Image: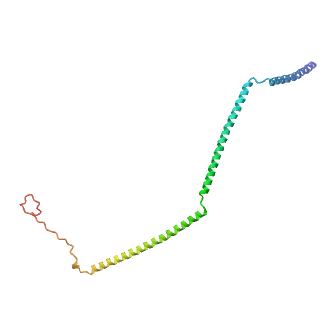
Amino acid sequence: MAESTAKTGTRSTKKAAAKKPAAKKAAASKAAASAKKPPPDLPGRIDGLRGWLDQIERRQSRMTYVMAAGLLIALATAGVALYLGITNNQDMATKDDVNALKDEVSKVRTESQTDTQTQIKALTDQITALQKRVAAAEATAQQAKSAAAQAPANTLPSLTPTVPTPTVPSNGGSGGNNKNP
């Protein structure tokens, strides 16, 4: 029996070995058949690719418009900068202008200093004049006090007031305001 199993074992391996190349050939023929056949929806796929290309073209045209707008903005900005540079150069002060302004400032400074000095002198003169007047007034007041101290007491007027006495009418005591009973 060992021989029969050995024979059947070799027979089964021979059959399996014979089946493997046949399976490979069948798979290869199926792949070749599918490669040769066009996909079932070829016009739909072509339309999809056309749509995709249209999207790319639209995106590219938008980018072109954006780039053109950016270029126009850059050119406008450069033009404005050039204009401002030219006008600022024309309006720029020269060294002579700066020197003239320095001279004017120094003149104004010296004039203000002289004006300040004259005002200070005038105020000082006024203050000394007022001090002299105050000293003269104080001297006059001192003389008046000393003269009043030397004058006799009889010459001064009396400061006691004289009060008049009221008169009361006598009409019999009927309904009058009599302060005397």
Residue 116 in the image, given as x and y percentages of width and height: 47, 70
Residue 175 in the image, given as x and y percentages of width and height: 9, 57
Q: Is residue 153 above or below residue 60?
A: below
Outermost residue toward the left in this view = 172
Q: Which residue is painted at 69% across and 32% down in the image?
A: 54
Answer with left or right where residue 25 lies relative to residue 135: right
Residue 48 in the image, given as x and y percentages of width and height: 71, 28
Image quarter where the C terminus lies is bottom left
**Which picture quadrant has residue 56?**
top right
**Which picture quadrant has residue 19?**
top right
Q: Is residue 69 above or below residue 136?
A: above
Q: Which residue is painted at 63% across and 48% down in the image?
A: 77
Q: Is residue 29 above or below residue 114?
A: above
User: Toward the viewer: 43 or 170?
Assistant: 43
Q: Which residue is painted at 75% across and 25% down in the image?
A: 42
User: Toward the viewer: 87 or 58?
Assistant: 87
Residue 50 in the image, given as x and y percentages of width and height: 71, 30
Outermost residue toward the front in this view = 90
**Which picture quadrant has residue 60?**
top right
User: Toward the viewer: 122 or 164?
Assistant: 122
Q: Which residue is painted at 32% across and 78% down in the image?
A: 140
Answer with left or right where residue 114 lies relative to residue 9: left
